[in-house]
Image: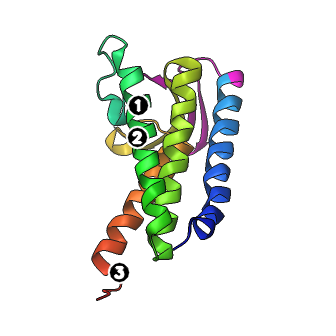
Amino acid sequence: MSALRARRWIGLILVVIVLDQISKYFVHTHFQPGERLNVLPFFDWILTYNTGAAFSFLADAGGWQRWFFVALAVIVSAWCWRWLNREHDARVQLALALIIGGALGNVIDRLWLGKVIDFILVYWAPWNYYYPAFNVADSAISIGAVLMLWSAIFGSKRA
């Protein structure tokens, strides 16, 4: 596949980044840290910050993790872009574009604030179960990862 055909995915990558940044900016400027707004019985908006990775991994590492996660996201994004340029399966291309957009959305936060803004809180109150807060970029990465797994398991087999 030519690089020109892969460039059609830049639009999706940019949409993910823009939606992520607009939503984070809104919450960052309209909420105080820890402030919650109930939306549904299982869903709140909340302003939290994460200096680590998923599930606050390495959040208390002392600051070096900021640059580690920036470098890791940039390297993974470049690798995914290279793969995207060579891939023929549109499902895999979609997954890679979502992963790239999400990774770069969180990189912007790390460069701007030194931490990632999280604001979506999903929970099950009867059992007092709270999933860690996340954002649009995290959602795009997760959806992309699930699509990659789905494609690997159920995708067409080519000779």
Crowding around mark 1 (Cα neighbors within 10 Å: few <14, some 14 to 19, many 20+) is few
- Quarter-wise, where is residue 50 in the image? top left
Query: Residues under labels 3 and 1: Cα distance?
Result: 31 Å
Which residue is drawn at the image coordinates 62% and 42% (left, top)?
A: 20
Which residue is drawn at the image coordinates 51% and 52% (left, top)?
A: 140
> Would you say residue 127 is visible in this rendering?
yes
Q: Position of residue 88 (x, y in %)?
A: 46, 76
Is 47 rendered above or below residue 74?
A: above
Q: Position of residue 23 (x, y in %)?
A: 67, 38
Instruction: Write down the region rendered in magenta.
Output: 29-52
Pick the front one: 127 or 93: 93
Which residue is drawn at the image coordinates 38% and 62% (left, top)?
A: 146
Tell whether position 34 is magenta.
Answer: yes
Crowding around mark 3 (Cα neighbors within 10 Å: few <14, some 14 to 19, many 20+) is some
- The amino acid pointed to by label 2 is Ile
Query: Residues under labels 2 and 1: Cα distance?
Result: 6 Å
> Which colour scheme appears in the figure?
rainbow
The residue wearing badge 1 is 71
Instruction: Tell whether label 1 touches label 2 (CB within 8 Å).
Output: yes
Which residue is drawn at the image coordinates 28% and 89% (left, top)?
A: 159
- Quarter-wise, where is residue 64 in the image? top left
Earlier-in-chain disc, 2 versus 3: 2
Q: What secondary structure is found at the residue carrying circle 3?
A: loop
Q: What secondary structure is found at the residue carrying circle 1?
A: helix
The residue wearing badge 2 is 75
Earlier-in-chain disc, 3 versus 1: 1
- The amino acid pointed to by label 3 is Gly
- The amino acid pointed to by label 1 is Ala
The residue wearing badge 3 is 155
Query: Residues under labels 2 and 3: Cα distance?
Result: 26 Å
Q: Residue furthest top?
A: 62
